[in-house]
Amino acid sequence: MPSSNNINSEKFISKTKVYLIIIAILMVIICVFNYRLIPVGIALFTLILLYTNWTNKKRKAELSEQLKDLTLDVNETAKTTLINSPFPLAIIESSGNIIWKSEKFVIEFNETNINDRIEDILKEIETTIENSENKNKGTINTEIEINEKNYLIQGSYVKNKKSHKKDEYTSIIYFIDNTYTRKLEQKEEDKDISVGIIMIDNYEEINQRMSSELIPLLITQVEKIIYDWASKYNALIVKSDRDTFLCIIEQKELIKAEQDKMTILDEIKEAKLPEEEISEIFLPTLSIAFSDDGDTFTEKMNSTKAVIDIALGRGGDQAIVKIDGKYEFFGGRTQEIEKRTKVKARMISHALKELIQESDNVLIMGHSNGDMDSIGSAMGLYRLTLTLGKEAKVINEVSGIGLEKFIETAKKDEEYTECFVNVEEAQNYIKPNTLLIVVDTNKRNYVESVEILDAIPRVVVIDHHRRSTDYIENAVLTFHEVYASSAAELVTEILEYSQTDIQLKNIEIEALYAGIMLDTKNFTFKTGVRTFEAAAYLRKCGVDIIKVKKWFQSDLETYQAISNIVSQSEIINNNIAISMYENNDKNANIIAAKAADELLTIGGITASFVLGKNDDKVYISGRSIGDINVQIILEKLGGGGHITLAGAQLENISLEDAKQELINRINEYFFEIES
C-alpha cells in the first residue's frame, strides 16, 4: 500500500498550504495598518504552522493505522499488485472525502464528476455494513452505475477506532467495469422466452345467444385482432382450441407490450358488428396470461396455466404477466358477465357429495372476522354433510355485532351447541381423511386459520371473490364463480342440485338467505337471475324474511357511530367519499362496512371508503356503484373483493397514514386509467 506521506501529500498541498497562504496574507495586511502587531502576528502564525504540522502528522498516523487494518491480511506483493492493478482504486472516508486514488482512477473518471456519485457509493457501502454481522470490519461487494457504465465495486471497510462517532469508517474500493458483462446478460434475458395463453372470455355466451349468421363474422374479427397484436410484438401464436390461443414471445417484446398497457384488451372490444345487430353483452373480452417461470417449456406452460386461472378467477377482461415471480395486472375494470347455465353447479354438487362420502369427517371454515355470508354458507354445507351421514364442525373464532345475534339464536337449539368450534378445538377433530371446506374466501392468508389449512391436505374451496395471487393452491375441488352475488348463493345451488333429500332447518335457511342479503345489500348489488333463483329456492324452503331482517338491525350506539362517520366524510376527486371511524373497536370492520354502504346513498357519490381501527389493524371498506373499481384500488393495499364491493386490512399503521396510503392508491388508479 502507499505510504502515509504519499496518501495525504496531495491533500496537504492543495488544501492546507492554500489555507496557510491565505492566513499569511491576511496577517501581512493587518500588520501593514498596525506595525505593533508584527511580533504578535509572527508568533500566532508560528503557532498555526506548528498546530497544522501536528494535526497533519496525527491525521497521517490515523490513516496509516486504518490502512493497516484494511490490508492486514495482504502481503507486500499483493499490495503492490493491488496498487498497480488495471482497476480504478480509491480510499474513501464515510464523510465522502477521497483520501487517495490510483492513477487508473484519475484516468477512468477524468471526464466524470465522480463527486456526484460518491454519495450513492457511500449509500451502497452503508447498506453493506448494516447487513453485515461485523460492523467494525468487512468486505464490500456491490454494483453501481457511473456515466452510463456498470461498475462492480469490491473492497473492504474498517471502522475508525479513534472516532467518537459510531458510523465513521474508511473504505478501500476498486471499480471493475462490468458493462459488457451486464449487456450480455441483458441480451440473454431479452431472448428469454415467455409462454402465454389468450382466451376469449364469453365465447360460450356469444355462441348461445347470437344468431348463427353473425357468430363467424365476430369471431373472425376477434382472431384478426389477436394475430395482428402478436405480429406487432414478433410473437408466435397458435390457435389451440376454439376459444384459446397459445403464444410464444421473447421477454423484451413482452416488456414492450407491458409498456403499451396491453392495448389488445381495448382493441378486442372494437371487434363488433353494427350496433343494431349486436348488443353490448356480446362485446368480446379476453383473459391473457404470460409467465417466464420455469426452465423448460413444460414448466413455463404449467405456470402460465396457473396465471390464466387467476385472470379468469378475477372476472376476466384482463391480462396478467408474471416475470421473475412478480405479477403485473392490466385491465379488469368491467363487470363480470353472469353465466346462465347451471351445468357447473350440478357437476360441483355431485363431486362434493362424493368427496364428503369418502371422508372421515368434515371441517368447514370461512374467512377471518366472519360475516353472515361465510357463516350462512358454512351452515348449508353443515346440513349437507350431516345428511350424508358424516360428522361436521364449523370453525368460528369471532362473533361481533354481525354474528352475535345469529350465534345466540342458533345455540338455543341443542343441535348447534357443539356445531361451532374454535381453532384450538378444531385441531382435535383432524383425522387422516378429514375434508376441509373453505367458504367465502380464496386467499390463503385470509382464512380463519392458516394452521388448519396447512394441516389438512384435502381442501375444497367455494368462493365468489376475485382471485388474488395468494389463492389457495392444490384444492381437490374449487367452485369459484366471480359473477355470483355471494358464497351463500353458490352453496344454495349445490344444495339444490345435490340429488339428496336435504331437510334444511329454519336457522340454516335463514342463514343462507341472510348471506345473500348481506353481500347484495338487500338485492341491490351484484344481483343476477341466478341470485333471485337461489333466493326463490330458499323462499320455497320457508325462510322467514322478517326474522332475517332483524339480524341486520343496528343498535342505537352503532347507528350513531355510523351517522357520525357519514357526517365527518370528505370528498376527493369530486365523487369519492372517504371517512374514518376513530374509535378502537373490535367491530370496526363491520361498522366501517355499514358506513361505506350508507355513504353510497348520497347523491353524486360514486365510490366510498371508510377506515376503522381495531388494535394494530386498520380495516378499509370500499363501495362503488360500478363506475370506479374499488377492488383494483384496495388490491394495491393487499385487499380484494369485487368491482363494487371490496376490503383491505393493514397492520401496524395509524389511521391517518392508512388514509394517505389509500388516497395515493386512488390517485394511482386514475393515473393508470388516463395513461
Image (cartoon, rainbow, N blue to C red):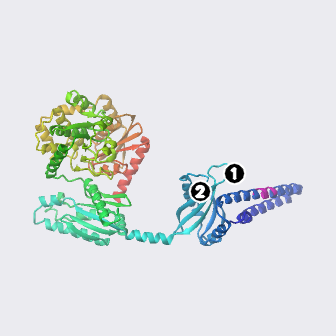
Q: Quadrant of the N terminus?
A: bottom right
Looking at the rendered structure, the secondary structure element under dot 1 is: loop
Q: Which residues are magenta?
A: 50-55
| Mark 1 or 2, closer to the camera | 2
Q: Which residue is mark 1?
A: 162
The kind of residue on which mark 1 rests is Lys
Q: Position of residue 466 (x, y in %)?
A: 27, 50
- The C terminus lies in quadrant: bottom left
**What whole-number distance in Å separates the C-alpha atoms at marks 1 and 2?**
18 Å
**Label 1 crowd bin: few (<14), some (14–19), many (20+), radius 10 Å:** few
Q: Looking at the image, is 656 positioned above or below residue 628? A: above
Q: Nearer the viewer, residue 98 or 455?
A: 455
> What x and y, as percent, mark residue 455?
31, 44
Q: Which mark is residue 138?
A: 2
> Amino acid type of disc 2?
Gly
Q: Residues within 10 Å of mark 2 (few under 14, many from 20)?
A: some
The local secondary structure at tag 2 comes to strand
Residue visible at 67% across and 48% down? 164
